[in-house]
Amino acid sequence: MITSGYLIRWAGGWTSVFYFSGGVTMLWFILWIYLVYDTPEEHPRISWQEQKYIRQSIGTSTAERPDQMPFKAILTSGPVWAIAIIEFCHGWGLYTLLIELPTYFKTVLDFSMENVWEACNVYEEYLHIKEISKEDAEVGAALALVGASLVGCSRTSAVILLTTAVGVSGGVCASYIPNQVEIGPNYAGLVMGFTNTVGNLAGFLVSAVAGSLTRGHPTDQHRWRSVFFISAAIYLVSAFIFVAFATDKEQWWNRRKIVEPTDTPGQTAYENKEKGDASTVAKRQS
């Protein structure tokens, strides 16, 4: 992001940002294909010392996938929907900053974008490396957005507060993102695909809402205040949902049923320990 302002000014406008970002992404993809493998044993260039260290650190997983993909169970799972709603709420605030912030700086504060990104990113990186919890991140971002909407045309205050909003929101990297691995490691990719889709819907809605509020009045601070207030409120909703409904417990649909025989003569009971309910299947023994 720190390069965007300079690219826009010196490398051909907005299109240069997309070409640069796309090119870097393609390079990352090539490196990913070449360097990343599913397990340490599959990697052709890993040393045995590193392989041993990884195995001793993470242990050996005994969770086996069910025979069939539990689509219905995942899509009706409360913790999964909690993550999806949290990601949508966080996405709303983040897309407000990423999509609407350049317009706000340019039209209201009359601030050049290369100066904005240069000032913002050093401070933002400092905030990212701090240990910030999910609820602290969202509440902090909400308060920063409210403050930015109330400081008027003070460029310095607006830059500090809005950069704080973006920076502290980095706390989500230690919250709902790894939470998808905690509740269902065997299907973390599927869960991520679903929740990320829900979260990215916010990008479309942010543009529509902000556009409708500022249409015809792009320099009206009161209208921009409404844009930031809405994002702050949604940030607070995200923090509440995380505290109230998120869990780090592995969900029952992540693995196969655990079966154990009972002492009842002539019968065997199969107990699904993940769901917590037991069913008895009669089986005649020879």
Image (cartoon, helix red, strand yellow):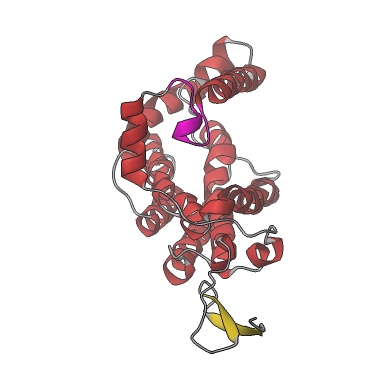
Instruction: Pick the residue in front: 267 or 280.
Output: 267
Question: Residue visible at 43% across and 42% down?
Answer: 166
As drawn, 60 above or below 256: above
Q: Quadrant of the C terminus?
A: bottom right
Instruction: Pick the residue in front: 175 or 252.
Output: 252
How many numbered discs? Answer: 0
User: At which x and y percent is residue 36?
Assistant: 51, 28
User: At which x and y percent is residue 196?
Assistant: 61, 49
User: At which x and y percent is residue 228?
Assistant: 52, 52
Please tell me whether the stretch drawn in magenta is mainly helix, strand or loop: loop
Question: Residue visible at 64% across and 63% down?
Answer: 74
Is residue 225 in view? no
As drawn, 12 above or below 192: above
Question: Residue visible at 41% across and 51% down?
Answer: 141
As drawn, 6 above or below 85: above
Instruction: Pick the residue in front: 226 or 170.
Output: 170
Question: Residue visible at 56% across and 61% down?
Answer: 255
**Quarter location, residue 70:** bottom right
Q: Range of the magenta residues?
A: 36-45
Residue 69 covered by magenta stretch: no
Instruction: Pick the residue in front: 152 or 189.
Output: 189
User: At which x and y percent is residue 125?
Assistant: 35, 33
**Quarter location, residue 269:** bottom right
Q: Residue furthest front?
A: 286
> On the rendered structure, is 153 left or right of 94?
left
Is residue 170 in view? yes
